[in-house]
Each structure stands twice: as structure tokens, then as C-alpha cells.
Amino acid sequence: MNTTTVNQSDCLEVKVPVPLFFSIGVVSLAENLLVVVSVIHNRNLHSPMYCFICSLAAFNTIASLTKTWETLMIVFANVGQLEKKGSSEMNLDDVMDSLLCMSFVGSIFSFLAIAVDRYITIFHALRYHNIMTMRRTKAVLGVIWITCGVSAVLMVRFFASKFIMICFVVFFVISLAIICFLYFYMFMLARIHARKIAALPSSSGGKCSRQRWWGSSMRGALTLTILFGVFVVCWTPFFLHLIIMMVCPMNPYCECYRSLFQLHVVLLMSHAVIDPAIYAFRSAELRHTFRNMLLCSDWKQRS
């Protein structure tokens, strides 16, 4: 997505080496593919929350693949193997932009789905398996992927229109507000429930089991809050760049911020690298699956 223009300020554009782009893309691609395969491979991870995490990792995989391929195209163009403005190259660039937009929109929707799943897990635990069935989970995932695909094509097709860019930014801000409100509301209620559990008599047989269940549920909610926080940190500079493009495209001070665009892209790509590390650090089951797959433990046992 071409979001850069000629810099008319005294600030020189910061250039990031192509090998760094390529390295981040390859590492994030490998990590997120590992998450997707792990969730599919391990039956213990076939739950709604991990299905949504798998979807999030799949969207990160698309973003990583897109940026890695774009980096390769830049390398081929620099050595004269590709035309920078040929018709086929421009069409391929539009496809990659569509996939990147799809990744962003899909990540937002995945976080929304995970937040709702955690809310139901914590505050409607007895009805959770009736509400969040695998059939409904698959239906939600289908809607998410279809919606992301259609919206990504529309965004790239009409991105030259300022209205589409405004919609893109507004969608980001509103989504952040909804998710933040949901997590804030969830943790406020969590404090109330924790006090009620603490007020139970010590001799109550169900107190210990409730505390263990509550701790496990809140640990999952905290993990997803960390994931969301990383997402906000990594994507916000890019959207601030888009806002500056609309509000003050020729202002020299704004141009100084825009000169950091490649750093913003590196930060954006780093999101796909950090997420799998958080999964592995916070989830013992997923960490165990990673270890077995990397060491080929299952294959050794079968042989």
C-alpha cells in the first residue's frame, strides 16, 4: 500500500535494510505456521478460544507471507528483474495490499471474538459449552474470514478515496474502544466475583475448586489482554501515519513523522513475531505441543 510521498521537510527518510524486512517476515511466517499446525495437530487445543487464536495466527501468517513476498519483489526490482510500474507488478501489489488489509481486519475481529469468548467463560461458565459450541465457533470464523476478504478488496480498490481511508481509521479506533471497554468491564466484574469467592467460608468444599477455576480463567483473560496490548502498540504508529496523511499532508512537522514510515512497518511486522512467543510463554499446553513438534517426539514414539 503506497502511503508515502515525497518528503518536503528537513527530516531525511529513515531507511530500513531489506535483509531486516526479509528476516522478520521469515521468522514470523515460521512461528505463526507453527501455531496453526500445533492447534490443528493437538486435540486438546480444539476449543473455541484456541480456534480463534489459530485464526489470529493464520491472519498473522498471511501478513508475514505478504511482506516477505513484497520484500523479494523489491530485491528483484532493484536488480532489474522486475518493472517497478509494470501492469502485472501493479496488480500483484494490489493483491498484496488486499492481503495485508485482510490480515489487519481479521486480527481485529479475532480479538473481538476472543474477548467475547473469555467473557462467556468467566461469567457464564455453567452455560459456556451450550453457548460456545464448535459448530457456532466454525460459523463465527466463517463470517470473519468472508467479511475480511470482502472488506480488504473494497479497501484496496477504493483506497485513493479519502472516505475509504477515513473509514479504515475510524474502524480501527472504534474497534479498539469496544475491545478496551469489554476487557475493562470484564476485569471490573472479575474483582467483584473474586471478593465473593474470598468471602466464602474456609470450610466450604467448593471454595478451592472455584479458586483454581477462577485463576485459570483469569490467566487466560490476562494472556489475551497482553496480546491485545501488543497489537495496539505495533499497529497504532501506522494508523497515526494514515491520519497525518489526511490531516496535514504538506506540514513539515508531519513530514518528519512520516519519514519514519519504514520503522512503523517494521513495528507492524514485529507484531506477528511477538504473538507466538506470548502463546508459548503463557500456555503450557501450547508450549508442550511446540516442543513435541520441534523435537519430532510424536514421530519418534510412533516409530
Image (cartoon, rainbow, N blue to C red):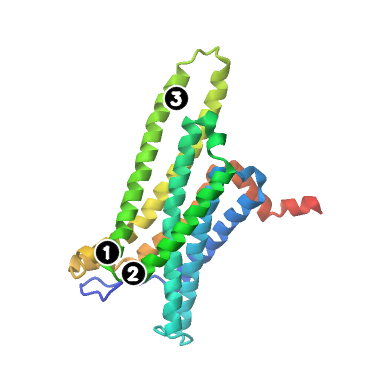
Residue in view at x 36 percent, y 63 percent: 264
Decide if residue 42 is on the left or right side of residue 12. right
Quadrant for residue 268, please give it: bottom left
Decide if residue 208 is on the left or right side of residue 270. right
In front: 27, or 124?
Answer: 124
Task: Reply above or below: 231 against 75.
Answer: above
Q: Which residue is mark 1?
A: 163
Q: Nearer the viewer, mark 3 or mark 2?
A: 2
What is the C-alpha distance between the residues marked 3 and 2?
Answer: 49 Å
Q: Which residue is mark 2?
A: 158
Q: Which of the labelled discs sits on residue 194, or is there none?
A: 3
Residue in view at x 57 percent, y 40 percent: 133
- Can residue 194 be seen in the rendering of this structure? yes
In front: 76, or 196?
Answer: 196
Element type where label 1 sits in the image: helix
Q: Position of residue 141 (x, y in %)?
A: 52, 51
Quadrant for residue 31, please give it: bottom right
Q: Position of residue 130 (x, y in %)?
A: 56, 35
